[in-house]
Image (spheres, rainbow, N blue to C red):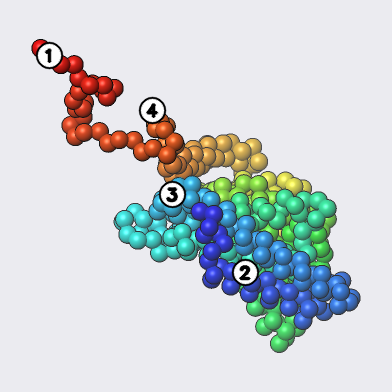
Amino acid sequence: MIERIFNDPVAWGILGGVAGLAFLSALIFKSRFEGDSSAGDSVLRGVEAAILSLLGGLLARAFISLLLGWANDSAAAGLAVGWGFFLIPGIVDTIPYLTHSKPILTTPENLLMFATVVGSLSGAAGGLWRIYSWTGLGWIGFPLDVTWALAGNTVGCLLHTINFIGYWISQLGDGTWGVHGSETRENAHRYQTGFGLRPGFAFTQGAVMSNLSDAPGADLYRHERTHVWQNRAFGPMYTLTYVGWIVVWVAPSVVGACIVAGLSRFYSGPNDWCYFNNPWETWAYKVQNAERTSIIGVDDEDRKLIWPAKWVIAWSIPFFLVATLGAALVVNSVWIEAAPQPVAPQTQSSKAGQKPKPQPKGGSQPKGNPHGAPAPKHH
């Protein structure tokens, strides 16, 4: 379990390659980073990015190796880790697991490689943009991002990639897409423009806040950074319950919208019940000091479907109780019951350097005096 963290040459190739590219990027593209006024600044930025890249990949790899090893690398552990910390591998391998087929993406080797890539890229991006406050919460945020909060940061790496590609494509035009914010040490990335699920709305995954024009201190910024820390605090429970809330309510929301707002507004149900009524979003809007019924684009028909906060709390209690029970059952089944049992000590110990004598077959005692004394003669 420990050895495989370090003895994979492919993993070291990835770690070294990402760290090297991060260091070179800090030097070559220093004009793209705010505050790099000298070669020395660029070198320091590159060193931080390279170190965090190596540490991120190794921490993520060690974390996943520990989880898998604790459950003896079972297929069930692979599926649970795939769902809880990378999501897509778990989705892909659910049917093979249920049909007792070989896993496709959730083998120990694949999961360790996913951890290496995500941890390394997250660390490199964090170092290049200097997001972590090393005099504050960065010491908590960074290790959480590459371990407990891997699920959100797996998607966060995809956001980095999309915005990076979009940024360079936009250089052929006005160059305003995928622009990263210039602030540092805020413990989160902020893309002023970039990928979003719909116009005018930011999109946050892991430590990456995308399509967010509001700078630190603004109400919307505080909303999105709340999601960053929700992911860090609750890890896989945040990601899976966010998605689970959507799955549970999407069909009832369509029916509810048709009843309350009419057949022509059936599409409002998923938006209002799955997003605005989502407890994680209700929490973030509270931090933002914004009424969900007053958000841009919300009309009178939507207001009929958006619940008061007390209703959200009421529905959240049974929802999270069931989710927590399900998580506890998975942990018990996959890890606690599968944990290696301690070996019972032997009842008798042999002398040092002396092997115990084998017992005769059938369990019978040897003939004669058991102490080796000559048997008495009978006259």
**Where residue 347 is drawn, which disc sits there?**
4
To which quarter of the image does residue 297 belong? bottom right
Residue 217, horizontal then vertical, whole percent = 83, 55
**Residue pictured at 49% horizontal, 47% vertical:** 70
Give amino acid for label 3: Asn
Give the alpha-carbon distance from disc 3 to disc 4, as whole Å. Answer: 28 Å
Q: Of marks 2 and 4, which one's residue comes earlier in the chain?
A: 2
Q: Which image quadrant: the C terminus?
A: top left
Nearer the camera: disc 2 or disc 1 = 1
Q: Earlier in the sequence, mark 3 or mark 1?
A: 3
In-front residue for pair 296/194 = 194
Q: Earlier in the sequence, mark 2 or mark 1?
A: 2
* Mark seen at residue 72: 3
Work out how far the residue at label 3 is from the one at label 1, CA to CA, in angstroms: 62 Å
Which of 161/227 is in front? 161
Q: Are marks 2 and 1 in contact (CB under 8 Å)?
A: no
Whole-percent x, y for residue 344 in the image: 41, 33
Left or right: 127 as drawn, with respect to 94 = right
Q: Disc 1 marks which residue?
A: 378
Q: CA distance from mark 2 to mark 3?
A: 26 Å
Q: Amino acid at mark 2?
A: Leu
Instruction: Tell me how far mark 2 sits from mark 1, CA to CA.
Output: 83 Å
User: Of the numbered discs in the image, which one, if any, rests on residue 321?
Assistant: none
